[in-house]
Each structure stands twice: as structure tokens, then as C-alpha cells.
Amino acid sequence: MNPASTERRAHLRAATQARLQEQRQQPLPAWLATRTARRALALLPMATFALGVLAATAGGGFNTAVLSAATSLLASYAIVALRRATRMLDNAPESLLDEREISDRDHAYRRGFRLTLLLLGALTVLTVLNSFLAQEAGVQLFESVGWMALIFASLLTATMLPAAALAWNWREPALEPDDLDK
């Protein structure tokens, strides 16, 4: 490997970690500092999935496109807000975290995995229900375009679940006596 490129990558990595640490140290806005606000944000993945289901049942055309765009916007906002509310704990490298933060993040990833399994279960139930209704009543819940909107919303929802699980139980670290004087 080229020593210059290795050195450049190391410098970029160090600069990125420094920028991330600086962002993590900024105080949270007042509306994000409460546990109630974080729990409300943690429910946004459900809203994203619900919008995806609504887009999937819209029957295609303009309604599906508008609802899919709304789903994308809501998911983008939710991902940024959830990560900000938890001080980007789910993205931070272990070298920037203490033991409690690593434990909280790992626990949130386990809960996020379980929630993702529940999401896949919900998709399976919708698939079986759609198939049953198509065979028995000649009615489909989702057309082909609807399935694409539903899968898209599910992927967006799955990307938010670890951060949502973290935000649900996350607590601001208590200041230690040395930090109170600063």
C-alpha cells in the first residue's frame, strides 16, 4: 500500500472522529432533552411503516408517489432526530465511547434486531393476508407498485429501529463531580 494514502486515510479518520466527538458534546436542544420527547421520536418508525402501508394500499399512481415521498421525508427526519437525541451513540466508534455507552448501544442493537424481526413478521402476515384475500375474495390489498412502496418503507423503518430502541430507554449521562465545576 502507498504510505501517503495510508497516512491520508488515517488523518481523515482522525478528523472525522474529532468532528463526531465535537458534535456529541454539543448540548441537546431543549425539545430533545426530555425523556418524553425521545420516546415520542422513538415512535416515528411506526409512523413511517404506517405511511408505507397506506402508500401500498393507495392503488398506484400519484397517491402512491406522494405517500412514498412523505414516507422518505419522515424517515429522513426521524433518522436525523433520533441520532441527534441520543448524541449519535449508534454511529460513534468504540474509541469515543465509555463502557456504559457501549453497553447501552449494544443493548439497543439487540432490541433493534428483535424489532426488525417483528417488522418482518408483520410483512409476512400482510403477505399471507394479501394472498388469502386474492384467492378467496378476488381482492388484493397491494398491487405490484404497492409492494414496492411497502418494501421501501420497511427498509427505511428497519434502518431506524436501533436508534429508536436506543432513544426509548436512553438516559443522559450524569455529570461526575469533577465535571460540575466546569
Image (tube, helix red, strand yellow):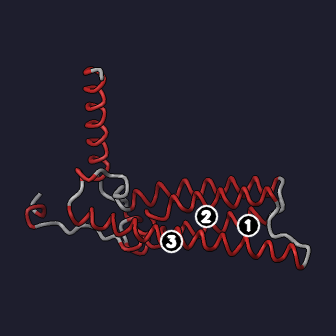
Mark 2 → mark 1, Cα distance in angstroms: 10 Å
Quadrant that contains the C terminus: bottom left
Amino acid tagged 2: Thr
Amino acid tagged 3: Leu
Foreground label between 1 and 3: 3
Q: Is mark 1 on a helix, strand or loop?
A: helix
Q: Give the residue number, with chain letter if any, for mark 3.
A: 115
| The quarter of the displayed image where residue 19 is located | top left
Residue at 40% across / 69% down in the picture? Answer: 110
- Closer to the chain start, of discs 1 and 3, is 1
Q: What element carries label 3?
A: helix
Q: Give the residue number, with chain letter if any, for mark 1.
A: 54
| The quarter of the displayed image where residue 4 is located | top left
Residue at 61% across / 73% down in the picture? Answer: 121
Q: Give the residue number, with chain letter if any, for mark 2.
A: 48
Q: What element carries label 2?
A: helix
Mark 2 → mark 3, Cα distance in angstroms: 14 Å
Residue at 30% across / 30% down in the picture? Answer: 9
Picture coordinates of residue 161, whole percent (x, y)? 49, 65
- Closer to the chain start, of discs 2 and 3, is 2
Tell whether 137 sits left or right of 105: right
